[in-house]
Image: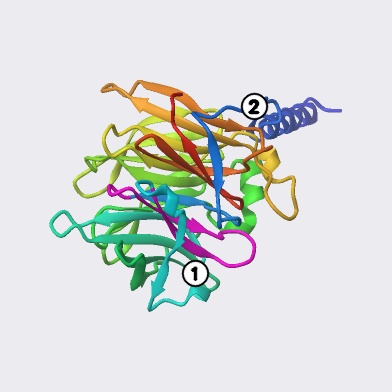
């Protein structure tokens, strides 16, 4: 065997070991998770087939997207934190067929003068990736269809954050689409991106990401946060006057982040995570992933304090994707399972 061939074989062996170790660590095979909650928790019916994203209005109304994966149908719901006895309510869609609803991430824009609420919703129609815009009527619990936005740069939309009545940032989770997700995960490809839609067209504002998932913005609209699932990071960007993004910090959180919610008062982050990714792939019928919610606080110099608010090994609640605080209550959403409500008594 020639020295050159030995070098090639050694390099290949090193690469193989590196990929194996990445799968072991990246999929969470090395982890042990201990169940805990900030207070008593209970599942909220009628949601059984996912509560993938949640966005909560200042009034205490939480809007919930359901049915991303699997039967029977997709839906949108609301939950009033101030009236928990009312339970989860189905939202009525006006001028939009429920059969065309394939909801994923979402965000709201509140007009500073009128208080009018506009919902931006990622929708995975069979023929196109789109962001659908609705007007929300809280009193009637209705969403009235306004328009559908598509663009050639919308390749595999995951989440959206509104910046105006018709402008937004959105994440592309993968380069080629969701059917190649496992390949991206194993190879740790960095083809995901963030785009900005200016009201007429989309443009790239961040590229080279590994599984760009949840996205959100600070209360002052100057900082954008992006969860990169495959690299186990929360990326922090400064938003410029032209809406371009400048990297500020890469925070390694050693778990796979999904959606990000931002506290409107403190600016703190609440991140839904998948600590044991291998459990997400262990069921052919319904996802059996573990759950983890992280609370992240940044000081003025971007030094972070991270606390684990909630964790479940998959025995009681599966596949946490998002969490939202309001007062002393917390909602936890799931990819394909139930919606969880917890009393917050400390964490």
Q: Position of residue 216 (x, y in %)?
A: 36, 44
Magenta stretch: includes residue 73: yes
Q: Position of residue 213 (x, y in %)?
A: 48, 47
Mark 2 or mark 1: whose residue is earlier in sequence: 2
Contact, mark 2 vs mark 1 (Cβ under 8 Å): no
Image: magenta residue range: 57-80
Given residues 66 and 202, the one toward you in this image is 66
Q: Position of residue 26 (x, y in %)?
A: 63, 33
Mark 2 to mark 1 CA distance (whole Å): 35 Å
Work out whether 174 lies above or below 27.
below
Given residues 163 and 67, the one toward you in this image is 67
Work out whether 306 lies above or below 337.
above
Q: Residue at x 47, y 51 (%)?
A: 53
To which quarter of the image does residue 326 belong? Answer: top left
Residue placed under numbered mark 2 in the picture: 33
Residue most extreme to the right: 1
To which quarter of the image does residue 121 belong? Answer: bottom left
Residue placed under numbered mark 1 in the picture: 101
Q: Which mark is residue 84?
A: none
């Amino acid at each position: 065997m020639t020295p050159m061939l030995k070098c090639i074989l050694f390099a290949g062996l090193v690469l193989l070991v590196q990929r194996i170790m990445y799968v072991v660590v990246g999929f969470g095979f090395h982890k042990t998770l201990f169940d805990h909650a900030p207070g008593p928790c209970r599942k909220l019916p009628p949601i059984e087939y996912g509560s993938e994203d949640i966005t909560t209005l200042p009034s205490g109304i939480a809007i919930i997207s359901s049915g991303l994966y699997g039967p029977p149908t997709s839906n949108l719901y609301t939950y009033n934190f101030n009236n928990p006895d009312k339970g989860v309510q189905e939202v009525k869609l006006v001028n939009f067929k429920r059969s065309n609803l394939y909801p994923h991430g979402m965000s709201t824009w509140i007009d500073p003068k009128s208080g009018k609420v506009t919902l931006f919703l990622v929708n995975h129609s069979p023929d196109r990736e789109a962001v659908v815009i609705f007007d929300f009527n809280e009193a009637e619990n209705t969403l009235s269809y306004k328009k559908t936005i598509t663009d050639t740069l919308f390749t595999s939309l995951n989440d959206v954050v509104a910046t105006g009545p018709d402008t937004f940032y959105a994440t592309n989770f993968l380069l080629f689409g969701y059917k190649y997700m496992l390949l991206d995960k194993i190879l740790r490809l960095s083809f995901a991106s963030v785009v900005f839609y200016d009201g007429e067209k989309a443009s790239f504002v961040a590229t080279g990401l590994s599984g760009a998932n949840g996205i959100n913005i600070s209360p002052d609209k100057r900082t954008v946060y992006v969860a990169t699932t495959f690299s186990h990071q929360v990326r922090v960007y400064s938003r410029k006057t032209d809406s371009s993004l400048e990297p500020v910090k890469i925070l390694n959180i050693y778990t796979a982040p999904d959606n990000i919610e931002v506290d409107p008062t403190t600016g703190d982050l609440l991140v839904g995570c998948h600590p044991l990714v291998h459990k997400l792939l262990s069921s052919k019928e319904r996802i059996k992933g573990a759950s983890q919610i992280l609370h992240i606080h940044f000081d003025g110099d971007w030094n972070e304090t991270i606390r684990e608010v909630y964790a479940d090994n998959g025995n009681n609640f599966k596949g946490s994707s998002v969490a939202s605080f309001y007062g002393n209550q917390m909602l936890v959403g799931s990819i394909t399972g139930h919606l969880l409500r917890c009393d917050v008594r400390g964490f």
